[in-house]
Image: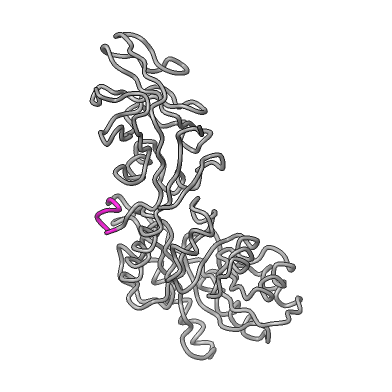
């Protein structure tokens, strides 16, 4: 019998979350972001779950090729663009769009002969200060690209740093938009033709703000997570991944007894401890503290002791009927992943992406 731990991917939830993103998009086309193996959900499943998207966006060139091999015929966008001139030949061969965010990439484009034109997203750095040209440099970058015969459409793109915060202490979305509009206007002022299409919103931008854009790039919301402090359910989102296991052992311990490595948990009274077949080698966060919530037979219980490689322990005081074989939901349906992540001091993105290869995955 296999170890009782399995991740279930809910394709219907992915489809509904995509529909929710489209409803928020105000007529914009939707890039479904599937980087990091579709946030741990798998590229093949993402293709089916997001079949209604206008395009798929990711950062891995080889995964983009894999999407084409799997039969995806709509646009594919490389969010970090290309890393070497050889990637440009792959982009032309497989019809991939790419981000252009630095002078070195423009230089590669200028010196590489391509058999077909490629479409690009010209990235503007409006304050995130990761990738992109400053608003002051964007017009020159655009002019160099537009002069190249093997460049097709050019879309202006930026990324928001704090769209999930109602009142950020530093860089606000409004400030970033002012910078973006100034950069876009500089292209027009240089006589470079009509206004360019734009790609603006991530999940937080879509859910919390109302911006006009030609393309949007939702990520975490498509998987039933929230980019803000509000619950995903409040936004009408459904969990797309459930991680479930079982109780594999029970210990009755007396007051003062300790549990787990480091003996960092001591029982205040007589308690029953359930041992769950899931640990940090499966992707569960080792740093999750006591009280991190789980469901045991549909009843909330809390983590105790230190998470070990293959097991974790829960207090069964509120689940007196629990026994070996009782079902445990670590996150997903009935146990929001964001709540687990918040208790563990991280974000739902990390939990999804950290799902280990040894965990079996099925579909519902």
Picture residue at 66% right of the left edge, 82% below the top = 117
Picture residue at 50% right of the left edge, 50% below the top = 40
**Residue 169 can be seen in this image:** no
User: Quarter-wise, where is residue 332 in the image?
Assistant: top left
**Residue 328 can be seen in this image:** yes
The spot of residue 309 in percent (x, y) is 52, 28
- Of residue 259 and residue 203, the one placed in the foreground of this image is 259
**Left or right of 186 in this view: 295:** left
- Of residue 190 and residue 224, the one placed in the foreground of this image is 224
- Of residue 78 and residue 330, the one placed in the foreground of this image is 330
Where 267 sits versus 232, above or below?
Answer: above
Picture residue at 46% right of the left edge, 62% below the top = 127
- Of residue 56 and residue 133, the one placed in the foreground of this image is 56
The spot of residue 300 in percent (x, y) is 26, 33
Where 188 sits versus 255, above or below?
Answer: below
Stretch in magenta = 231-236
Residue 145 among those drawn in magenta? no
């Amino acid at each position: 019998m296999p170890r009782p731990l399995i991740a279930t991917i809910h394709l219907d939830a992915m489809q509904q979350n995509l529909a929710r993103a489209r409803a928020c998009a105000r007529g914009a086309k939707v890039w479904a972001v599937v980087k990091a193996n579709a946030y741990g959900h798998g590229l093949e499943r993402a293709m089916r779950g997001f079949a209604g998207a206008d395009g798929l966006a990711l950062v891995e060139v080889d995964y983009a090729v894999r999407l084409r091999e799997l039969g995806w015929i709509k646009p594919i966008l490389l969010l970090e663009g290309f890393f070497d001139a050889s990637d440009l030949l792959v982009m032309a061969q497989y019809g991939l769009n790419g981000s252009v965010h630095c002078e070195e990439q423009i230089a590669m484009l200028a010196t590489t002969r391509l058999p077909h034109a490629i479409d690009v997203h010209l990235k503007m750095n409006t304050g995130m200060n990761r990738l992109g040209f400053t608003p002051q440099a964007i017009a020159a970058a655009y002019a160099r690209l537009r002069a190249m015969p093997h460049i097709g459409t050019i879309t202006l793109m930026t990324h928001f740093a704090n769209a999930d915060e109602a009142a950020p202490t530093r860089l606000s979305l409004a400030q970033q938009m002012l910078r973006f509009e100034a950069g876009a206007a500089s292209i027009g002022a240089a006589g470079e033709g009509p206004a360019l299409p734009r790609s603006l919103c991530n999940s937080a931008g879509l859910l919390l703000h109302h911006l006009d854009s030609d393309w949007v790039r939702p990520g975490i919301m498509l998987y039933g997570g929230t980019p803000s402090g509000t619950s995903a359910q409040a936004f009408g989102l459904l969990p797309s991944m459930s991680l479930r296991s079982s109780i594999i052992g029970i210990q009755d311990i007396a007051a003062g007894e300790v549990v787990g490595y480091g003996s960092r948990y001591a029982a205040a009274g007589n308690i029953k401890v359930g041992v769950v077949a899931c640990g940090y080698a499966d992707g569960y966060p080792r740093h999750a503290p006591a009280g991190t919530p789980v469901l045991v037979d549909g009843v909330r219980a809390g983590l105790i002791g230190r998470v070990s490689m293959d097991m974790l322990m829960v207090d069964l005081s509120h689940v007196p009927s629990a026994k070996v074989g009782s079902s445990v939901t670590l996150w997903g349906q009935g146990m929001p992943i964001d709540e687990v992540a918040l208790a563990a001091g991280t974000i739902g993105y990390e939990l999804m992406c950290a799902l280990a290869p040894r965990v079996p995955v099925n579909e519902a």
